[in-house]
Image (cartoon, rainbow, N blue to C red):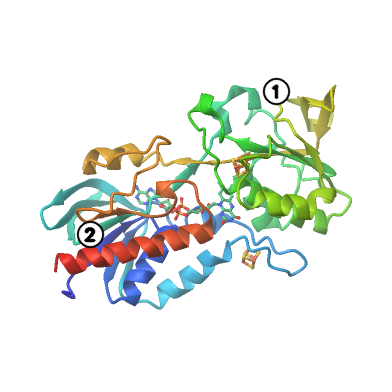
């Protein structure tokens, strides 16, 4: 294969970094462009969920390992705060206009791997959550960041410790009315791991899960549910309405074992799911790609355009790594065929 071949990778999350590392290991150069000012994507903002020093296999440190390896791989170039102004296929390769600040630079690549990831569901899209109005109602993304930065949970309203908290599962997932009928795969796992970590650090904190029926839970859920079930309260209902009560406690009305009950908590976390990136339609238009029924890109793996990681659908960090590695095997086949 010609040494001059270079692959453009869009997005420096775990998918993009893994793709670059796999190409680098095979001697293929790549340029990874990242629209933000740092690499790591969403996973770079997540907490280590080890409990009493024991790993809970959340996968978050895979990003730390990838960032370390990137620095030792000379085949990889990274351009931060860079996005695409235009993109099209030519008979032999991809032509891109890279945009950094006001400057646009044309560049030619042998292949393209789209690793632009996902967007967490924005609960402001559903007015009943009153997200943004209720100070102690946060998302799983915000809880991840709080656990990473502070190592514990606090009420955003006054910074006080949390005596009781709740997780609401399946927010923005498994909801056909929102056009999101699918399971996001990861929110049971991240919520349960964080709950276990919080409970171990603060044994007196009471934690309640509001969840749906058990048939279609995410992969991690059944195993962990049985392992930790006695540590938490389980209410098989997703509350409909949320409100702020005295002392900035978050209130919900639920039916628990036939009784209508108002329940309040110091902190409530919406376990938001994974949705398609807002850049998806642009790539679809530029490259004539098709979207699957759930709005994610269908991996085309053809004519030099490849898609890896959560841009193809909800998946965990370890599954994203596996997906990016498998995609690179196809990229290598393509580069061999066209050399
Ligand atoms: C709240 C929450 C908690 C989670 N916790 C866990 C967990 O504990 N364990 C686990 O295994 N999984 C977890 N996940 C899932 C995990 O976030 C994903 O598996 C992982 O982030 C997917 O990586 P990715 O590289 O495909 O996408 P992303 O992490 O979304 O990375 C995409 C990158 O591309 C960049 N980008 C996007 N568009 C462009 C563009 N046009 N130009 C240039 N750059 C672009 C973005 O800025 C970003 O850096 C969680 C998900 C959520 C929502
Ligand atoms: S997999 Fe998760 S819990 Fe285990 S060490 Fe890594 S970040 Fe911590
Ligand atoms: S992973 Fe769990 S919380 Fe997330 S959508 Fe699936 S069942 Fe619901």
In the image, 197 versus 145, the foreground residue is 197
Ligand 2 positioned in quadrant: bottom right
Q: Residue at x 47, y 57 (%)?
A: 320
Seen from this angle, which residue lies furthest left?
91
Q: Which residue is mark 1?
A: 241
Using residue 255 as the reference point, say whether residue 71 is left or right of it: left
Q: Earlier in the sequence, mark 1 or mark 2?
A: 2
In the image, 234 versus 6, the foreground residue is 234
Seen from this angle, which residue lies furthest front?
215
Q: Position of residue 250 (x, y in %)?
A: 76, 31
Q: Is residue 225 in view from this perspective?
A: yes
Q: Which residue is mark 2?
A: 111
Using residue 311 as the reference point, say whether residue 104 is left or right of it: left
Q: Is residue 78 above or below residue 303?
A: below
Q: Check disc 2 and report its element: helix, strand or loop.
A: strand
Q: Check disc 1 and report its element: helix, strand or loop.
A: loop
Q: Position of residue 18 (x, y in %)?
A: 41, 65
């Amino acid at each position: 294969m010609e040494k001059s071949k270079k692959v453009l990778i869009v997005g420096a999350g775990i998918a993009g970094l893994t793709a670059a590392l796999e190409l680098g290991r095979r001697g293929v150069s790549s340029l990874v462009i990242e629209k933000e000012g740092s690499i790591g994507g969403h996973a770079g903002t997540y907490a280590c969920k080890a409990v009493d020093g024991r790993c809970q296999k959340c996968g978050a440190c895979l990003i730390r390992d990838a960032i370390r390896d990137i620095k030792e791989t000379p085949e990889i170039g990274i351009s931060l705060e860079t996005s695409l102004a235009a993109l099209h296929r030519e008979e032999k390769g991809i032509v891109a206009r890279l945009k950094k600040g006001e400057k646009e630079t044309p560049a030619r690549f042998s292949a393209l791997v789209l690793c632009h990831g996902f967007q967490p569901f924005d609960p402001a899209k559903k007015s009943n959550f009153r997200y943004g109005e209720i100070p102690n109602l946060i998302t799983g993304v915000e809880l991840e960041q709080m656990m990473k930065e502070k190592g514990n949970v606090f009420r955003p309203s006054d910074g006080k410790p949390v005596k009781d908290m709740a997780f609401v599962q399946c927010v923005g997932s498994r909801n056909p009315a929102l056009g999101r009928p699918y399971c996001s795969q990861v929110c049971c796992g991240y919520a349960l791991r964080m709950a276990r970590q919080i409970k171990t650090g603060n044994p007196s904190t009471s934690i309640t899960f509001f969840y749906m029926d058990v048939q279609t839970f995410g992969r991690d859920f059944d195993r962990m549910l049985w392992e930790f079930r006695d540590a938490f309260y389980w209410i098989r209902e997703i509350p409909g309405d949320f409100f702020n009560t005295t002392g900035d406690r978050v209130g919900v009305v639920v039916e628990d074992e036939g009784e209508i009950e108002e329940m309040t908590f110091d902190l409530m976390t919406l376990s938001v799911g994974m949705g398609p990136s807002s850049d998806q339609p642009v790539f679809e238009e530029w490259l004539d790609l098709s979207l699957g029924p759930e709005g994610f890109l269908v991996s085309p793996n053809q004519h030099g355009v490849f898609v890896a990681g959560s841009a193809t659908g909800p998946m965990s960090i370890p599954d994203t790594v596996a997906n990016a590695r498998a995609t690179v095997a196809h990229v290598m086949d393509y580069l061999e065929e066209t050399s």
